[in-house]
Image (tube, grey):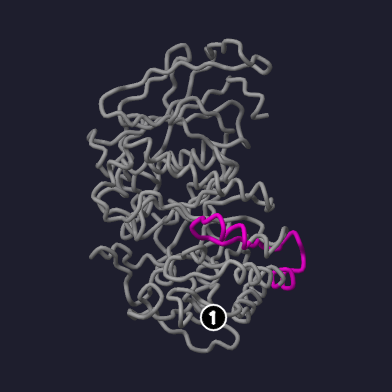
Amino acid sequence: MYFKFTFCPIILLLWASLSFEQNVNVVIHGAASIAEKCDYNQCPWGKAGILNLDLRYGALINAIKAFNPLRIKVGGSLQDNVVYKVGEVSSCPNFMKREDGLFGFSQGCLSMERWDQLNRFFNHIGVKLTFGLNALFGRNESQTEKGLWIGDWQPQNTKDFMQYTISKGYKVDSYEFGNQLSGSGMGAKVDAKQYGKDVIVLKNLVKELYAHPETQPKVLGPGGFYEDKWFNTFLEVSGQGIVDGLTHHIYNLGPGDDPNMMNKILDPSYLNQVSQTYKGVSDVVNKFRPQLGAWVSESGGALNGGSKDVSRTFADGFWYLDQMGMASTYDQKVFCRQALISGNYGLLNATTFVPNPDYYGALLWHRLMGSTKKPGVSLIFINLSKDRSLNITLSNAKPGDAGQPNYEFVGKQNREEYHLRALTGDIKDDIVCLNDVPMVQIDSEDIPAMDPKLVDASTPISIAAQSIAYVTIRDFEAPACD
């Protein structure tokens, strides 16, 4: 999913991870309409794919509307195996299991009838849409190097799709070119020079079809794992002004069946290792200066659908919110959570659409973090300790006071605090409490109220063991946020 932020970033503690300019959470994974995607002898995707998700549920609509607005990214593992039933494409096959196919599936299809349904849904709930394009159309797999797809990208099917989209007045904020084709790839890869040439073709196509610059969708890429040489080569070939946003994926917890997953999440030194990836991407952005900077266009923590024992639990928030904070530190403009629905890492249950704990952490981030709404600062604290609470006092470093003692801050207005913890105290619980109130939907499909606790500003900020807290201070002077 994607969301905007509210307050500007400040870092007070090692785990006080804060905001960046625009926050995002992804949406609907492109799973199969007939065959189902399964990993580690589990099939957690159900009918939550973009081609077969039932869009009529009030719980789903309310969960999305709560972000107001929400950025939705349509795409995923199979987007480079999808044709669009428009123009010269007359047949529309379902995805089927196929051992020699990309990710074990045959080619699938997005019909324009389904595209119409999706856009009615998007318009109804009010979203900003990023659409993942098939970047393998027209290519063939190399006979000499497994996984390498060669040849020029053929844009005709995409052109027909865009023309249909324009004719219907559907709004697409951005097009992302391909999924995980960079570097060594995931299932498939494209040479960096070839990708650079093809993304120029896409950019020219967007300029041709969308005549007015103000309504012209942005072009994003490569939407894959960061490898320094590949990213630099692709951007050298494409040149400046072609890719509007540089997108990459983060899955730093490894495969979803790793029995050591919980220990990774609770180990700050392990969580910090991915900072090298953020730094590498940041260096490339500083070198080539794409207009929109860097985006994390997909991140679900654990690969291949997430971890069935961890991703749906309160503990996953330690990884998730830490990653959004780290992304803000390295000036990533967008952070896309894989996924809103589907897999073990969905923010919503794929069958009932009941929110998992990470949903509430994401919603608070959306409402509190950033620099565009109310005065003051908002902080997030993550306490990984199993048995030690923290009592925190704040200091304010005044401009020009380098080398001088900081000033202890004592506010005059009550602080607004939002404390998140597991219902039973066990971080493997799948119910979260906000200020000791369980976040559950009772006789309603509405999202529960998420009100702050007002706390005397003269007292220290208390963070319980293995908990997460957002703290908003309205009268904290922070000139950097002005």
Quadrant location, the C terminus: top right
Question: Horizontal placement of 463 versus 10: left or right?
Answer: left
- The quadrant holding residue 93 is bottom left
Which residue is at 77% across, 64% downward? Answer: 212
Instruction: Determine the residue positioned at 47% across, 76% down.
Output: 81
Crowd band around label 1 with a 10 angstrom C-alpha radius: few (<14), some (14–19), many (20+): some
Up the image or down, 397 lies above or below 369; here it is above
Give coordinates of residue 479: x percent, y percent: 66, 24
Q: Is residue 213 left or right of residue 256?
A: right
* Corner quadrant of residue 480: top right
Q: Residue furthest right?
A: 212
| Residue 60 screen position, x and y as percent | 41, 56
Q: Nearer the viewer, residue 169 or 292?
A: 292
Number of residue marks:
1
Residue at the spot 42% in from the left edge and 15% down from the top edge: 460
- The x, y position of residue 470, in whole percent, is 45, 30
210 inside magenta stretch? yes
Amino acid at circle 1: Arg
SS class, disc 1: loop
Q: Which residues are magenta?
A: 205-234
Using the image as rendered, state which of residue 344 and residue 322 is in the foreground: 322
Question: Given the current orientation, which residue lies at the most extreme front position?
Answer: 144
For the residue pair 124 and 158, the one nearer the viewer reads as: 158
Left or right position of 319 against 232: left
Q: Which residue is mark 1?
A: 139
Q: Is residue 440 left or right of residue 482?
A: left
Is 382 inside the magenta-drawn segment? Answer: no
User: What x and y, as percent, mark residue 351?
Assistant: 31, 60
